[in-house]
Image (cartoon, rainbow, N blue to C red):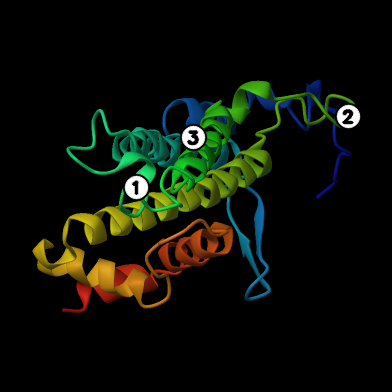
Amino acid sequence: MDVVPSGEVAGGRRAYESLPIRPAMVSGVRGGWCCGGRFFDAASSAVHNSGNFYGGHVAQAASALASAVASVGDLLDPQIQLLVDPKFSLGLPANLIAPVEATDPEAGLPHGFKGAQIAASALTAEALHLTMPVGAFSRSAEAHNQDKVSMGTIAARHARTVVRLVSEVTAIHLVALCQAADIVGAHELGPRTARAFDYVRSTIPFVHEDRPLNEEFQQTAETIIDGSLRRAVMSG
C-alpha cells in the first residue's frame, strides 16, 4: 500500500482531512467521552493508547470537574464567613477567638481566624477563575495541520489546581469548625463528626493565641486529598 504524506492529494482528495471536518471532532459535541491520543502515566511509566486522537473529550471532562469542585469551594467560603462573624455565628466569638476575661491584658488583641477566612476567600476566587472552559480557546497549530486543538492538557492542569485550592479551603473550613466545636462543647458532636474532630485534634491543637496556621492547613489538606481523613471518619 502506498503511503501518501499528510496533507497531499491522493486521487483528488486530501489524505489527511483538516481537523474541523473529521468525525472525531463531532463526537465531542455529541457528548462522546472516548479518550484521545496517548496518555503517559508518570507514576507507573505506562503508556495508554486509544482509538481516537482528539483530546476534546478530556478537556470537557476536566473543565466540568474544575467547575464542580470550585463550586464546593464557593459553598465553603461563605460558611467560614458565617462562623467568624458574630452577627451570624449564633453566639460564637468574633473570628473564633478563644474566650478571655474582659480584664485580661490580651483581650481584643488576637486575630483568631480572621486571616484564615481572608485566605479561604482568596483561594476560592482563584479556583473560580479557573473554571472557564479551556476548550473554548482552541488555536490552530502546525501550519494548520492541527487546526482544531483540544486544549485538554491545559484543562487537566487547571482541574488539578482547582482540586488543590479547594482542598486547602476545605482544610481551613474543617479546622475552623473544630475551633468552634471546642468553644461550644465538642462533647455534643455526633459520632462521625466526633471522629473527624478527634482526627484533626490529634495533630492540630486548639488556637488559644495567634500562631502561624499555614502548615497546619496544608497538613489537613493532605489528609483530605489522600483519603486518610475520610477513612478515619468512616472506620467506626
Residue displayed at 40% across by 62% down = 208
Nearest to the eye among marks 2 and 1: give it.
1
- In the image, taking residue 210 as reference, residue 78 lies left or right, namely left
Label 3 close to label 2 by CB (< 8 Å): no
Q: Amino acid at mark 3?
A: Ser
How many tags in the picture?
A: 3
Dot placed on the residue nearer the N-terminal end, 2 or 1: 2
Residue 231 location, quadrant: bottom left
Residue at the spot 54% in from the left edge and 61% down from the top edge: 218
Q: Above or below — where is 177 with respect to 227?
A: above
Residue at image x 80%, y 50%? 1
In the rendered image, residue 9, in percent from the top left (x then y), is placed at 86, 26
The residue that label 3 is drawn on is 121
- Look at mark 1 in the image and give the residue it sits on: 96
Vertical comparison of 187 with 11: above or below: below
Q: Could you give the CA–CA distance between mark 3 and mark 2, rounded to whole angstroms?
A: 54 Å
In the rendered view, tell whether residue 219 sits above or below residue 136: below
Which is more N-terminal, label 1 or label 3?
1
Examine the rendering and report whether any part of residue 6 can be seen: yes
Crowding around mark 1 (Cα neighbors within 10 Å: few <14, some 14 to 19, many 20+) is many
Disc 2 marks which residue? 8
**Label 3, label 1: how many angstroms apart (C-alpha)?**
17 Å
